Image: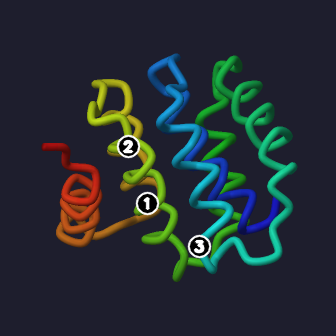
């Protein structure tokens, strides 16, 4: 798994965590992969393989632990906040943060060893970017 695959896996995982991958979340993931510099040179067709990997791991008993192991091994610590920010953007994109999404985001904060204050700032930024009238 490459660093870009790991970032994509984080976004897919938070979207799939409530068992309903909404259109707005899928569009957000696609938009992020197509526009952000961290995904420069990434083949968007790999999203299908990354998504299937996440779905397969979610079906296993210790799959979430395995997923976080793959993500941690692929991501340099300097990209942990980026990964969390992308996951927060996907979670906030439909205007609703489901309980399961909130729990997964909490687990992501722990697994990526993010400072709680930094994570709160990232969460607030995602909420502000996806506010509706």
Q: Residue furthest front?
A: 133
Residue 63 lies left or right of residue 87; in this view the side is right
Q: Who is closer to the viewer here, 95 or 86? A: 95
Q: Earlier in the sequence, mark 3 or mark 1?
A: 3
Question: SS at mark 2?
Answer: loop
Q: Residue 94: percent from the left, percent from the top?
A: 36, 35
The residue to which callout 1 is attached is 84
Callouts 1 and 2 close, C-beta under 8 Å: no
Residue at 63% in and 80% down: 37
Q: Are marks 3 and 1 in contact (CB under 8 Å)?
A: no
Q: Where 111 falls versus 114 (above or below)?
A: above
Which residue lies at the image location 36% right of the left edge and 25% below the top edge?
100
Residue 71, compared with residue 133, is above or below; it is below
Residue 48 coordinates in the image, percent (x, y): 82, 39
Residue with the mark numbered 2:
93
Q: Which mark is residue 36?
A: 3
User: Which quadrant of the view contains residue 16?
Assistant: top right
How many C-alpha atoms fall within 10 Å of the one at disc 2: few (<14), some, or many (≥20)? Answer: many
Of the image marks 2 and 3, the number of the one nearer the N terminus: 3
Which label sits in the foreground, 1 or 2?
2
Measure the C-alpha gap from mark 2 to mark 3: 16 Å
Residue at x-position 58% and y-position 49%: 29
């Amino acid at each position: 798994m490459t660093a870009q695959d790991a970032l994509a896996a984080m976004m897919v995982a938070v979207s799939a965590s409530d068992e309903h991958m909404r259109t707005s979340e899928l569009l957000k993931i696609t938009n992020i992969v197509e526009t952000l510099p961290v995904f420069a040179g990434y083949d968007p067709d790999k999203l299908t393989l990354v998504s299937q990997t996440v779905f397969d791991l979610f079906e296993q008993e210790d799959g979430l632990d395995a997923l976080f192991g793959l993500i941690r091994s692929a991501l340099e610590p300097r990209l942990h906040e980026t990964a969390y920010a992308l996951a927060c953007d996907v979670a906030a994109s439909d205007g609703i943060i489901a309980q399961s999404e909130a729990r997964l985001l909490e687990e992501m904060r722990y697994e990526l060893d993010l400072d709680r204050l930094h994570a709160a700032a990232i969460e607030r930024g995602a909420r502000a970017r996806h506010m509706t009238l």
